[in-house]
């Protein structure tokens, strides 16, 4: 065995490592798109991942290797350089939502691995005449599979479709059996364009004062997530089950309701989010109200009248409680006498025949709105006023959702990094506008998944930011032009508009700007599907 052959083997191992890591990344993106090839394909189109620098460079190296087939030393050198660099990039990259190795993810990855082995092995047999050419052919094939890894991932999901349907049917039937065995369980569904996760946590904390309560954990807001919660988390002695219901297309919420049959439903918001898949605000409204439409005649809908597409939607199939913080005209539950301090918020929740003065660590109008919905449900379920007050005072902020922190250096951090949207970002800017005594700094890449209105709404976001903050650090390229244009139209000083290529770069720039007494708002950290 010569030194050259050993080097060839090492290069092959690097190329295979590159492929292993890339298939893992592709699987992570497929998982974030609910294992649906059509959604994954839309992500490929919107993210430009198929034509990004990495993919195009790899294709150039791949075709160059084919051209220089007789001079394998040069080709192997190019492959080694590229694969080593990209392996380092993949190993050091951090993800907001890393891959979760569920049984389904493992099955898909196994099939993708088999496809990759068959292609690589086939190339070795077809083009290898001696030990050098076989290693060379396997190396080039591994790079070729990397170039086509998206196709491999989609093919893996399609191949497993019959298997997954059979497995999911069994899980579904088991979850339905468990729910049927608990006829006295009160099931509360929560949906909305935004605010549903926070509302779920707040309601769980309040109801837990009087009931044995379970909620869907984390982002388990799909049908499969709910099924898993029922099978793994729900206990026979539970009295209340709070189900967060997410949707990326019409029918998603109805599918969950057909399984759990909620008797109470909360709709927190209908707004311009996920327009890439919903296409129109009317489709968003119809989908969110699938929850309300599923409620029985003796059930109860609790809906947020601060949103036009909720206020103008009649509800006649069940009892309907409307709540509001701003548009209070037709609302039966409202929040009044709101007082913000650096320690939190105080407000009065007024409902039919009752008024509760509440104090919370939470800040922002959106959080007051979410709490109001929870209080309305709790009162209707008979939770005593004193228990409601105590629970509200003890509620902790949900991570990345207007989460207020103070650093030892005297800097206030407002973390609103999760899932920014037009209404939520406006509320976050209102919060930072109330901060006094130091500079107000916003770090943001803008808003995503807004369809054809992405540019317009980010421009409006920038314009409002100019009136609420002293310094804006605009991150990345995706929305940069629109946000900067809005900041200028809002008459923010040019020296106060700072451009950063990444969040790491933004953090470096922040260190030279921030000082004790300042407030920093992190508004929307782009999810991995848009990085």
Image (cartoon, helix red, strand yellow):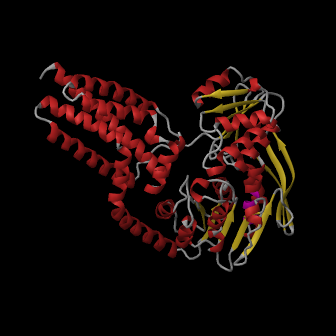
The quarter of the displayed image where residue 188 is located: bottom right
- What quarter of the picture does the N terminus occupy? top left
Q: Main secondary structure of the magenta part?
A: helix
460 sits left or right of 215 in the view: right
Residue 152 position in % (x across, y down): 34, 48
Residue furthest out toward the bottom: 297
Q: Which residues are magenta?
A: 371-378
The answer to whether residue 299 is visible is yes
Residue 96 position in % (x across, y down): 53, 41
Q: Looking at the image, which is closer to me, 210 or 136? A: 136
Membership of 225 in magenta stretch:
no
Q: Looking at the image, which is closer to me, 436 or 282? A: 282
Residue 230 position in % (x across, y down): 50, 64
Q: Residue at x 47, y 69 (%)?
A: 175
Membership of 376 in magenta stretch:
yes
Q: Residue at x 17, y 24 (%)?
A: 5
508 sits left or right of 84 in the view: right
Q: Looking at the image, which is closer to me, 97 or 271? A: 271
């Amino acid at each position: 065995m010569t030194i050259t052959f050993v080097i060839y083997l090492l290069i092959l191992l690097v190329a295979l490592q590159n492929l292993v890591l890339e298939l893992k990344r592709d699987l992570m993106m497929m998982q974030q798109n609910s294992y649906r090839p059509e959604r994954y394909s839309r992500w490929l189109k919107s993210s430009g991942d198929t034509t990004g620098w990495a993919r195009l460079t790899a294709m150039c190296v791949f075709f160059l290797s084919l051209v220089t087939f007789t001079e394998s030393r040069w080709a192997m050198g190019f492959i080694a350089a590229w694969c080593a660099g990209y392996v380092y990039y993949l190993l050091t990259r951090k993800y907001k939502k890393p891959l979760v190795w569920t049984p389904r993810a493992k099955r898909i990855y196994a099939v993708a691995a088999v496809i990759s082995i068959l292609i690589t092995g086939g190339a070795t047999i077809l083009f290898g005449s001696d030990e050098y050419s076989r290693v060379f052919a396997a190396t080039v094939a591994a790079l070729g599979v990397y170039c086509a890894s998206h196709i491999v991932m989609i093919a893996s999901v399609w191949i497993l479709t019959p298997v997954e349907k059979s497995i999911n049917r069994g899980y579904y039937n088991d979850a339905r059996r468990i729910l049927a065995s608990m006829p006295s369980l009160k099931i509360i569904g929560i949906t909305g364009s935004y605010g549903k996760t926070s509302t779920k946590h707040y309601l769980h904390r309040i109801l837990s004062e009087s009931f044995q309560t379970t909620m869907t954990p984390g982002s388990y807001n799909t049908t499969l997530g709910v099924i898993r919660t029922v099978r793994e988390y729900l206990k026979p002695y539970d009295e209340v089950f709070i189900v967060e219901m997410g949707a990326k297309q019409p029918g998603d919420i109805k599918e969950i309701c057909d399984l759990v049959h909620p008797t109470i439903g909360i709709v927190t918001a209908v707004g311009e989010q996920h327009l890439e898949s919903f296409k129109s605000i009317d489709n968003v409204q119809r989908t969110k109200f699938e929850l309300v439409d599923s409620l029985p005649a003796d059930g109860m809908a609790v809906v947020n009248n601060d949103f036009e597409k909720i206020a103008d939607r009649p509800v006649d199939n069940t009892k309907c409680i409307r709540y509001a913080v701003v548009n209070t005209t037709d609302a039966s539950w409202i929040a009044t006498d709101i007082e913000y301090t650096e320690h939190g918020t105080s407000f009065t929740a007024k409902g039919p025949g009752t008024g509760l003065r509440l104090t919370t660590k939470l800040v922002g109008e959106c959080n007051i709105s979410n709490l109001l919905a929870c209080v309305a449900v709790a009162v209707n379920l008979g939770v005593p006023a004193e228990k409601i007050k105590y629970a509200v005072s003890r509620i902790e902020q949900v991570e990345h959702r207007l989460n207020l922190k103070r650093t030892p250096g005297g800097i206030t951090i407002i973390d609103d990094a999760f899932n920014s949207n037009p209404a939520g970002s406006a509320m976050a800017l209102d919060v930072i506008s109330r901060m006094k005594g130091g500079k107000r700094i916003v770090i943001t890449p803008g808003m995503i998944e807004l369809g054809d209105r992405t540019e317009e709404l980010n421009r409006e976001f920038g314009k409002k930011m100019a009136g609420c903050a002293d310094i804006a650090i605009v991150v990345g390229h995706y929305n940069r032009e629109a946000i900067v244009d809005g900041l200028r139209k809002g008459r923010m000083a040019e020296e106060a508009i700072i451009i950063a290529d990444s969040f790491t770069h933004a953090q470096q720039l922040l260190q030279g700007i921030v000082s004790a007494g300042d407030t920093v708002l992190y508004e929307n950290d782009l999810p991995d599907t848009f990085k």
